[in-house]
């Protein structure tokens, strides 16, 4: 994850990927939770495929630049979860009602958070010093070995073997696998960047058009099994290939933009704000279903949901920017805590020196 704010050190193409990743996640969630369950149209499920790459893109970027772990960074990550989850979660509990189990979950901000991605990303953040040490001076053989091992566990045992603990790819093993791939893409970027980036884009678009058409026209148990195992789950080979094509397409375009860099800082906030139950199921859901009833054809529905997604993402960014004073307080708290801990020399060297 890029942590510096200087435009001359931030690659805006990858910041754009972070924004697009969150846009895809919001768009996908609307079709997943509201549109498809209402219509049961195969196309409304098939369209998930090109949109489901958002999480993978985000982890690939983290590996590409390497997470720079620090006490300050960890406090900021947990602080965002507390600020963006607790108030909305408690409000949803008070308005909609809930059991004692849900009420107790508010005290377990990491383990009981409804945002599985944030929980798993925290695990990745904590483990990053270890994987960074391994990757720092790894040879090609060592990289190939760890990719092979993690890929076997995540993408073979998880998808083909259908191991219950690995089945959906929402786990640390899959995130480590993606992280190592992202880092390896950075290490050997001179090779894949020899191919003009638009070729990756052409292949990505063509492959996803074919997949959407196929899974819109053909249904059944066998087709659904192929869809789930090979192209949909986070530990599926087809979704990985699609994500890599998109990553190398946009990542291969070199440009700098202060605006893109500024907006991309809100990427995690977009994920957490839009996904809060109070907002997602009580605001976004009814609006999505209204737009569905309003639409006279698929094209009109797609455009309306697209515009709704733009509005949602924009609102989340505005909310995040309005919370900047709170983020400053959390950053200052994390910085003071980091200085206090490091002054005790418990670790021998700062965590963020392990790259």
Image (cartoon, rainbow, N blue to C red):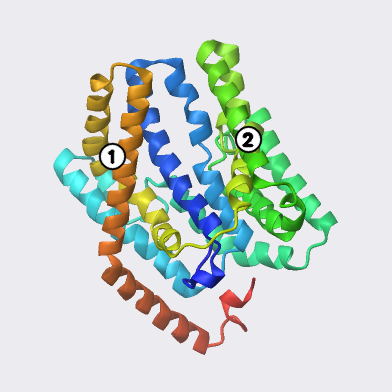
Q: Is mark 2 on a helix, strand or loop?
A: helix
From this view, report whether residue 156 is shown above or below residue 332.
Answer: above
Q: Which of 124 and 273 is in front in this view?
A: 273
Point 53% across, 42% down: residue: 170
- Sequence order check: which comes first, mark 1 or mark 2? 2
User: Given contact means CB atoms under 8 Å apart, are the residues at marks 1 and 2 in contact?
Assistant: no
Please provide percent x and percent y for residue 267.
41, 54
* Residue appearing at x 61%, y 45% in the figure: 249
- The reply, left or right, for residue 287 in relation to residue 27 is left
Vertical comparison of 270 with 237: above or below: below
- Residue 83: x %, y % from top left: 29, 60
Residue at (38% x, 22% y) in the render: 299
Mark 1–mark 2 Cα distance, whole angstroms, equals 34 Å
Other residues around mark 2 within 10 Å, as few (<14) / some (14–19) / many (≥20)? few
- Residue named by callout 1: 280
Question: Residue 165, how many percent across, how many down?
Answer: 57, 38
Residue holding disc 2? 202
Observer-nearest residue: 244 or 337?
244
Is residue 161 visible to us here? no
Q: Which residue lies furthest to the left in this view?
A: 95
Residue sitting farthest toward the right = 141
Q: Looking at the image, which is closer to me, 87 or 139? A: 139
Residue 62 in the image: x percent, y percent? 57, 58
């Amino acid at each position: 994850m890029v942590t510096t704010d200087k435009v001359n050190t931030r690659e805006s193409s990858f910041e754009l990927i972070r924004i697009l990743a969150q846009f895809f996640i919001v768009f996908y969630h609307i079709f997943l939770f509201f549109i498809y369950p209402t219509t049961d149209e195969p196309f409304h499920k098939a369209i998930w495929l090109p949109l489901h790459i958002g999480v993978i893109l985000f982890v690939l970027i983290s590996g590409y630049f390497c997470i720079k772990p620090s006490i300050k960074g960890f406090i900021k990550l947990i602080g965002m979860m507390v600020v963006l989850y607790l108030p909305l979660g408690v409000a949803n509990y008070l308005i909609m009602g809930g059991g004692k189990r849900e009420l107790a979950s508010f005290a377990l901000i990491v383990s009981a958070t409804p945002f599985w991605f944030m929980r798993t990303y925290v695990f990745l953040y904590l483990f990053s010093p270890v994987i960074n040490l391994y990757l720092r001076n790894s040879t090609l053989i060592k990289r190939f070995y760890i990719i092979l091992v993690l890929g076997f566990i995540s993408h073979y045992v998880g998808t083909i073997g259908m191991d219950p603990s690995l089945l959906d790819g929402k786990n640390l093993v899959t995130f480590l696998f993606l992280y190592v791939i992202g880092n390896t893409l950075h290490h050997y970027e001179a090779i894949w960047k020899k191919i003009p980036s638009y070729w990756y884009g052409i292949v990505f678009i063509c492959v996803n058009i074919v997949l959407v058409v196929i899974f819109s026209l053909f249904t059944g148990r066998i087709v659904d099994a192929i869809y789930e195992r090979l192209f949909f789950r986070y530990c599926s080979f087809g979704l990985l290939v699609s994500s890599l094509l998109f990553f190398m397409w946009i990542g291969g375009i070199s440009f700098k933009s202060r605006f893109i860099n500024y907006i991309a800082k809100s990427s995690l906030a977009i994920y957490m704000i839009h996904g809060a139950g109070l907002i997602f199921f009580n605001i976004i859901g009814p609006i999505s279903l209204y737009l569905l009833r309003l639409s006279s054809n698929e094209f009109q529905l797609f455009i309306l949901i697209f515009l709704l997604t733009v509005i949602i993402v924009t609102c989340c960014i505005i909310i995040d920017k309005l919370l900047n004073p709170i983020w400053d307080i959390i950053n200052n708290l994390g910085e003071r805590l980091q200085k206090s801990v490091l002054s005790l020399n418990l670790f021998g060297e700062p965590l963020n020196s392990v790259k």
